[in-house]
Amino acid sequence: MTRRHLLPSVVTALAVLLVFNLAVTMATRLTARRQFLARLDNAPRDTRLLFLGNSLLEDGTDLAAFAAAWSPAGQAPASFNAALHATTPVEHALVLKQALPRLPQVRDIVYGYFDDQLSLQSNTGWRDMISSRALAYSFPEDAAALYAPGSWETAWRFRAMSLMPMLAERTTIWSKVETLRKAMGAWGMSAGTAPKQEDLEELARRLGRVVQEDRGFSAAVKELFRLAETRGARMVVVAMPDGRPPGFHDGPAARALRAYNRAKVEAAHGLYIDASQWVTDRKYFKADGVHLNPEGARLFSEQLGRELSRARGLDRSSD
């Protein structure tokens, strides 16, 4: 093929690619990720307490119950739930960096976590960066610096993906189908299936290695504390209920990791709350056995409101 014949083909291919990307942009403008960013933009500016984390806190927070349990009554801080499903500490740091300039009165950041999330370095493979984790493509430089500090390859890949909606939004349509499939599959199921013993044993070994190797906080969690300190806000780190049996949370590996995390959080001038066993009855969990249902969220949020208002009172009395 001569250069004269090749040029129209290239132009046509580029035009098709452009049109397709525009079509994808239009089709995905109401994705959960984009809706979340729009909701964050419109968060009340008088917000003083920000909830941050993944789906455990997103589903587990009942703001009305939290406020009703606050003491003294009627004095609960204005709160906003910025937790987002299927996210890691990197996305949480990106959210916090966007939220703080918009919310000048935030003084407490309630950060929900589970397992070894505070120390874990998240993967950035093609199959990992989907759903809400595609939030990284909205802020590629910041995300790359947290996922892989100093990696030009990761920075280049995130930047390239951010410019190509057909790739950045590649799972949007399928994820809607998958969500519907899971919801239909859960119909008629009892509340949660108990985790397998071998899985719990492997998890216990994984948690134990965090303490043994003294891994500390991941780069993203360090960034959360840095952002909070810059604002003059306090990090309130909460070990979340996760549906696992009390025997697991009472085991040596889980207890050692919570003690380890508490020491790290307090050394960074944060407040640590162990809520891992606040809700243990499986009837308060959704069919997946991991996320709190509305009644479970109410119980968790009420106790969190009582704990935080008590801690706030102790802070004032010590001033």
Image (tube, rainbow, N blue to C red):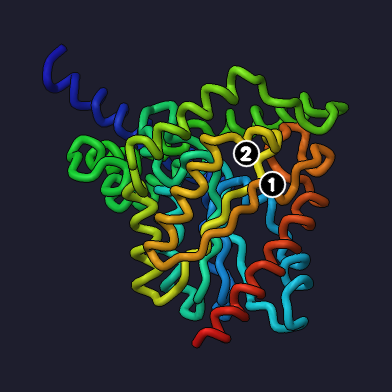
Residue 88 visible in the current orientation? yes
User: What residue is pinned by disc 2?
Assistant: 249
Q: Residue furthest top?
A: 1
Residue 163 visible in the current orientation? no
Q: Which secondary structure lies at badge 1?
A: loop
Tag 1: amino acid: Gln
Q: Earlier in the sequence, mark 1 or mark 2?
A: 2
In this rendering, is residue 230 above or below 110? below
Distance CA(mark 1)–CA(mark 2): 8 Å
Q: Which secondary structure lies at badge 2?
A: helix
Q: Marks 1 and 2: CB-CB under 8 Å?
A: yes
Who's the residue at 49% across and 75% down the image? 103
Q: Is residue 245 left or right of residue 191?
A: left
In this rendering, is residue 246 above or below 273? above
Tag 2: amino acid: His
Q: Which mark is residue 277?
A: 1
Locate residue 33, reporting x and y percent.
Answer: 53, 48
Locate residue 154, reporting x and y percent.
Answer: 25, 37
Locate residue 276, reporting x and y percent.
Answer: 64, 47
Who's the residue at 56% across and 76% down the image? 48
Q: Is residue 140 left or right of residue 306?
A: left
Viewer-nearest residue: 57 or 195: 195
